[in-house]
Image (cartoon, rainbow, N blue to C red):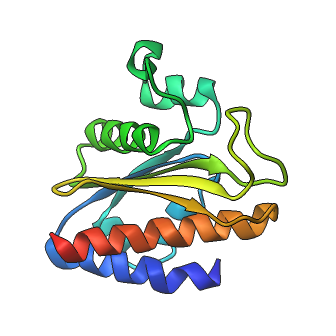
Amino acid sequence: MQDLIPLAEKAGGLLKERRQSIAVAESSTGGLIAASLLAVPGASAYFLGGAVVYTRQAREALLAIEVSQLEGMRPSTEAYALLLARTVRAKFGSAWALAETGATGPTGNRYGDAAGHSCLAVAGPLERSITLETGSPDRVANMHAFAAAALDLLSQCLATK
C-alpha cells in the first residue's frame, strides 16, 4: 500500500484545500482505495466513509441500489461504476465520490471480462469514468493498479474543477 500513499496524499491535499468531502464505493479493490485515503494524516477533514460492494448482497444492503436501477446495465462497466459513485455520493452527502468495479483475477468475472479489467468513476461537480485493462491475472497487482488508477482519476478531476 506504500506506493498508493503519494497518490492519496495528492487527492487528499486537494480535498482539504477546497474543504470538500469524499465517499468511496469499491468492489474488487476490497477497501484499498479507502484505506489509502485514510492512511493520510488529517483524512478526517475530507473522508466521510465508504462501502465495499463486492457482492449483490452488499450492494443492496450498503447502497440500497434496487434491481430496477440496473435495468439495461451490468456490473463491471463504466455506467455501473458511475451508478455506484452517484449513489454513494448521495448516501453520504459528499462533494465527491469515487467508485471501482472489476475483475482482479486470476480469472475473469461472470460477466465475461478478463482478469485485469476495471471500471472507475468519479461523481461530483465533474463526472468522469474510465476503463482500465492491465492484461494481468495477478490479483494483488491488479488490486493495486486499480486503486492507483482510481486515486489518479480522482486527482485529475479535482485539479480540473
Residue 111 coordinates in the image, percent (x, y)? 67, 33
Q: Is residue 47 left or right of residue 106?
A: left
For the question of whether residue 149 can be seen, the reply is yes
| Residue at (46, 27) in percent of width and height | 73
| Residue at (31, 36) in percent of width and height | 91
Residue 51 coordinates in the image, percent (x, y)? 50, 44
Q: Quadrant of the N terminus?
A: bottom right
Q: Is residue 97 left or right of residue 52?
A: left
Q: Quadrant of the C terminus?
A: bottom left
Residue 13, by quadrant, is: bottom left
**Vertical position of residue 87 compared to residue 139: above or below:** above
Q: Is residue 138 left or right of residue 102?
A: right
Residue 45 coordinates in the image, percent (x, y)? 28, 68
Residue 46, by quadrant, is: bottom left
Q: Farthest residue in the top direction?
A: 68
How many numbered circles does the render carry? 0
Q: Is residue 88 left or right of residue 7?
A: left
Q: Farthest residue in the right direction?
A: 106
| Residue at (53, 29) in percent of width and height | 74
**Vertical position of residue 43 compared to residue 66: above or below:** below
For the question of whether residue 38 can be seen, the reply is no
| Residue at (73, 49) in percent of width and height | 114
Q: Nearer the viewer, residue 93 or 73?
A: 73
